[in-house]
Image (cartoon, coloured by chain):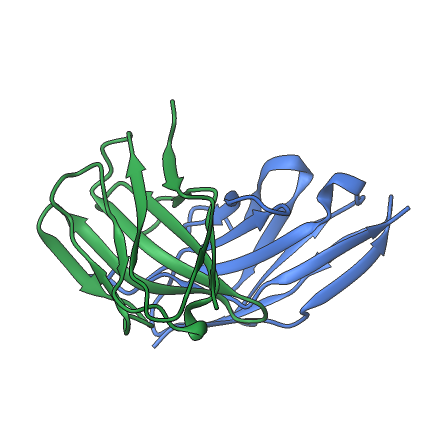
Chain colours: A blue, B green
């Protein structure tokens, strides 16, 4: 069975400093992995996805994530945080073949300090 | 292009009342789903559908009913609301086929059950 663990429920960074949001996954096969962002009182928006084409994935707004199979990780990074990055971020693992049950992490709330 | 539209945005119910949350998409997506979002628990799948007339249960289906009579609409029914159903509800859709297609989310319905 698949699972996904977001290691930090809250992360605070200063504006202009790097962002690291951590995600570990468990899967019996090679999954697709996603990061979604949710700004306050909004729906979720796709930041980036990994589908086995390349281990380093670039997304919108300067975010990127690296798939590391040996560490079963898919951490999200950004070199320099902006105030507009303050939001909740969800790591998601795709379902097994034949099902449609996407598994969401519990979320990481990113706070950006001026 | 409207995408995924949810109504209402806010709703307050009394225990035991029934109501229907509406979800419509105009992208001709075969797959539609309902999630609930609770603090610290991420998004949990309630029900999903892979086409008209086809529905299946997710992780937390108890207390909710769904039907899919058209490709566009996927309503979620609360038969007898309980305080435990106080949550934010999201509808999401995607094309069928591969599991690496992104989900499109509505803007959510905030439900309070008193």
The residue lying toward the viewer, choosing from B12 and A8, is B12
The residue lying toward the viewer, choosing from B102 and A51, is B102
Q: Residue at x 59, y 63 (%)?
A: A107
Q: Is residue A30 left or right of residue A83?
A: left
Q: Residue at x 48, y 42 (%)?
A: B107
Q: Residue at x 37, y 37 (%)?
A: B4
Q: Position of residue A12 (x, y in %)?
A: 81, 60
| Residue A82 visible in the shown view | no
Residue B112 lies, with reference to residue A15, above or below; the image says: below
The residue lying toward the viewer, choosing from A77 and A104, is A104
Number of marks in the image? Answer: 0
Residue A83 lies, with reference to residue A77, above or below; the image says: above
Name the image quarter holding residue B101: top left
| Residue B53 visible in the shown view | yes
Q: Residue at x 32, y 72 (%)?
A: B59
The quadrant of the image that shows the N terminus of chain A is bottom left
Name the image quarter holding residue B64: bottom left
Q: Position of residue B91 (x, y in %)?
A: 37, 49
Residue that lies at the very extreme toward the top in this rendered image: B1
Q: Is residue A38 left or right of residue A31?
A: right
Q: Position of residue B19 (x, y in %)?
A: 30, 56
Residue B71 lies, with reference to residue B80, above or below; the image says: above
Q: Is residue B80 left or right of residue A19?
A: left
Q: Position of residue A112 (x, y in %)?
A: 81, 50
Residue that lies at the very extreme toward the right in this rendered image: A114
């Amino acid at each position: 069975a698949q699972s996904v663990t977001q290691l930090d429920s809250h992360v605070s960074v200063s504006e202009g400093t790097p962002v690291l949001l951590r995600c570990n996954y468990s899967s019996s096969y090679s999954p697709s992995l996603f990061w979604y962002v949710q700004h306050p009182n909004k729906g979720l928006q796709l930041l980036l996805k990994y589908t086995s084409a390349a281990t380093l994935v670039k997304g919108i707004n300067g975010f990127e994530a690296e798939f590391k199979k040996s560490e079963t990780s898919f951490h999200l990074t950004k070199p320099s945080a902006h105030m507009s990055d303050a939001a909740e971020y969800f790591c998601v693992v795709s379902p097994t073949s034949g099902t449609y049950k996407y598994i969401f992490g519990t979320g990481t709330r990113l706070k950006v300090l001026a | 292009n409207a995408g995924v539209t949810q109504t209402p945005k806010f709703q307050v119910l009394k225990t035991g009342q029934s109501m229907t949350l509406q979800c419509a998409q105009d992208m001709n997506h075969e797959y539609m789903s309902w999630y609930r979002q609770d603090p610290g628990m991420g998004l949990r799948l309630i029900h999903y559908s892979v086409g008209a007339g086809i529905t299946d249960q997710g992780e937390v289906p108890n207390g909710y009913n769904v039907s899919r009579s058209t490709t566009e609409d996927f309503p979620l029914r609360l038969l007898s609301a309980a305080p435990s159903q106080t949550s934010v509800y999201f509808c999401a859709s995607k094309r069928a086929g591969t599991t690496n297609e992104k989900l499109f989310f509505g803007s959510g319905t905030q439900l309070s059950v008193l």
